[in-house]
């Protein structure tokens, strides 16, 4: 496949022998070796330590022997074509897959060295520590105030009304929404714009003081301005939280994350510093995906 | 026409994107060919004392300048439209930088042509033309090979060009010493020798620009920047 017949036609009259063979120096790694991830999948003192993770939907093996560390206070982006398993893998981190009957998770998944899938594990407590923001903004059909106050109330985080007020205000401030809604906290949340609703969902997620925030395509339903606001928010939140974000926007991954993980057909192909992934990725499949060579 | 299927920049989902990158590459090589010819003809005009040819070279520099502007615009549009990443991004960024090098090579050719006219007008016996011909051939080969290395994405050839640049520098130093001797022999030679010195200097700069292009080719292929690093580092990167 290595000939480039570049016949240069110019006033400069470049001779025909400029048709020269291309020396193809692309990495030959187009094959995926199961359980082998190129780059830097591991970290010292990780928040999540995930080893040999496999997820089955019935007979289907959706996640194939993935090992990965997620560091404290890092923003890690999961990218890959549709159906590559990135959302499935994300949902393992706070056991959102539990609600799917045919779904089985194998391997070792630890949060702060505690087994996430331990049968004695309190899943409600786990999800308070590992919050989640979904693709479509899904505020409760309640007031803005009650949306944010809901979590702290059921988890008993506030003893007095004034404490609860503080939590609501702080969460809305962190989500960059306070100035827009402070005068209408009693208004119903479903009347807000899409971008505001999504930031409200982020405020709701952080109101219970989680340690980790999982985001599953948080901006795919938002316009560019709302997207920019959410991205700005991610940068600020990363100072206090660990953030795992699944995104179909490669530019978004490049902008907000520290590390990027590339998933392909249930395999974790490459994990590297985001700057490296978008300028000179190690694996041929990563390169093909981010440069738009296959979908 | 370039064979799209076989080119490493020609296999995107978007055919339009393929076309844009291929066009950028083709136009860059076209500009490279123009600039090569400019230097070749400028040197020819000088050693043959052909002021007519020298005038042509000076006039043609406008075409080179126009290509620089066009290529920069094309590269800017690709960034705006496609937000290229990885090897595509490295191609676009490298072209933007290498176009500046080519334009400077064009300027050096113009400078040489100007000196050729001046030397014809002064009309004295030639001094240092052997050196001009020799260094001229040397840097022209480097420039040609650098453009070849770009077309074929050949980082090993690019590395050879980087090494070659040292030899050009040495040849330039030696030629400068010879001219200095002429000037000391007879002070009437000074004006003429200085003109020749300027030409040698211009050719030496052409070698530097060829070397810059070679460095960019290594960046395009290997994804690592070898500018301002020791030669051993460039060898390590290319050897990977």
Image: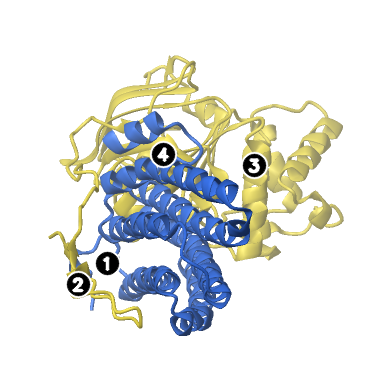
Q: CA distance from mark 3 to mark 1?
A: 36 Å
Q: Nearer the viewer, residue B123 or A55?
A: B123
Residue B221 drawn above or below residue A50: below
Q: Nearer the viewer, residue B202 or A225?
A: B202
Q: CA distance from mark 2 to mark 3?
A: 44 Å
Q: CA distance from mark 2 to mark 4?
A: 42 Å
Q: Position of residue A76 (x, y in %)?
A: 49, 37
Residue A97 drawn above or below residue B10: above
Chain A's colour is yellow
Crowding at mark 3 (Cα within 10 Å: few <14, some 14-19, many 20+): some
Q: Secondary structure at mark 1?
A: loop
Q: Position of residue B149 (x, y in %)?
A: 29, 55
Q: Are marks 3 and 4 on the same chain?
A: yes
Q: Secondary structure at mark 4?
A: helix
Residue in view at x 51 percent, y 26 percent: A126
Chain B's colour is blue
Q: Chain of mark 1?
A: B
> Which residue, given by chain and number where applicable, does mark 4 sit on?
A90
Name the N-terminal-most of marks 2 and 1: 2
> Which residue, given by chain and number where applicable, does mark 2 sit on?
B3
Left or right of B76 on screen, residue B156 = left
Q: Are the two marked residues, 2 and 1, in contact with CB atoms closer than 8 angstroms?
A: yes
Q: Chain of mark 4?
A: A
Residue B10 — which label? 1
Q: Chain of mark 2?
A: B
> Which residue, given by chain and number where applicable, does mark 3 sit on?
A235
Q: Position of residue B177 (x, y in %)?
A: 51, 43
């Amino acid at each position: 496949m290595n000939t480039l017949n570049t016949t240069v036609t110019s006033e400069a009259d470049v001779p025909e022998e400029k048709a020269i063979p291309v020396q193809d120096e692309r990495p030959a790694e187009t094959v995926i070796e199961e359980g082998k991830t190129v780059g830097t999948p591991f970290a010292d003192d990780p928040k999540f330590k995930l080893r040999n993770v496999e997820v089955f939907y019935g007979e289907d093996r959706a996640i194939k022997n993935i090992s990965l560390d997620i560091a404290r206070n890092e923003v890690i982006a999961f990218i890959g074509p549709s159906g590559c398993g990135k959302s499935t893998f994300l949902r393992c981190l706070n056991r959102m897959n539990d609600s799917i009957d045919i779904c089985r998770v194998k391997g070792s998944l630890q949060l702060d060295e505690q087994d996430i899938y331990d049968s004695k594990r309190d899943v409600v407590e786990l999800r308070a520590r590992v919050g989640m923001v979904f693709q479509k903004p899904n505020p409760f059909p309640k007031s803005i105030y009650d949306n944010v106050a809901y979590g702290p109330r059921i988890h008993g985080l506030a003893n007095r009304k004034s404490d609860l007020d503080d939590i609501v205000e702080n969460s809305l401030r962190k989500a960059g929404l306070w100035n827009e809604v402070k005068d209408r906290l009693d208004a119903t949340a479903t009347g807000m714009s899409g971008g505001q609703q999504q930031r409200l969902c982020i405020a709701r997620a952080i109101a219970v003081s989680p340690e980790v925030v999982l985001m599953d395509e948080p901006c795919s339903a938002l316009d560019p301005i709302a997207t920019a606001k959410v991205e700005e928010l991610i940068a600020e939140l990363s100072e206090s939280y660990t953030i795992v974000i699944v995104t179909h926007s490669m530019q978004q991954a490049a902008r907000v994350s520290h590390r990027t993980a590339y998933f392909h057909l249930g395999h974790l192909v490459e994990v590297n510093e985001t700057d490296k992934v978008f300028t000179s990725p190690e694996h041929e499949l990563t390169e093909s995906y981010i440069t738009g060579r296959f979908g | 026409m370039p064979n799209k299927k076989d080119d490493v920049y020609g296999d995107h989902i978007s055919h339009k994107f393929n076309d844009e990158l291929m066009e950028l590459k083709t136009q860059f090589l076209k500009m490279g060919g123009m600039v090569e010819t400019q230097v070749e003809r400028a040197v020819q005009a000088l050693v043959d004392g052909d002021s007519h040819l020298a005038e042509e070279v000076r006039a043609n520099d406008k075409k080179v300048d126009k290509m620089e502007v066009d290529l920069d615009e094309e590269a800017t549009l690709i960034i705006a439209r496609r937000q290229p990443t990885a090897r595509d991004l490295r191609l676009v960024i490298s072209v933007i930088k290498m176009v500046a090098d080519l334009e400077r090579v064009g300027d050096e050719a113009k400078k040489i042509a100007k000196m050729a006219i001046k030397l014809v007008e002064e009309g004295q016996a030639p001094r240092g033309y052997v050196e001009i011909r020799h260094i001229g051939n040397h840097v022209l080969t480097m420039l040609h090979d650098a453009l070849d290395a770009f077309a074929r994405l050949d980082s090993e050839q690019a590395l050879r060009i980087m090494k070659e640049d040292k030899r050009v520098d040495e040849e330039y130093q030696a030629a400068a010493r010879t001219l200095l001797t002429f000037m000391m022999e007879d002070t009437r030679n000074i004006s003429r020798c200085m003109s020749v010195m300027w030409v040698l200097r211009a050719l030496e700069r052409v070698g530097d620009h060829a070397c810059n292009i070679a460095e960019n080719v290594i960046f395009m292929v290997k994804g690592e920047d070898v500018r301002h690093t020791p030669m051993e580092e460039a060898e390590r990167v290319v050897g990977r």
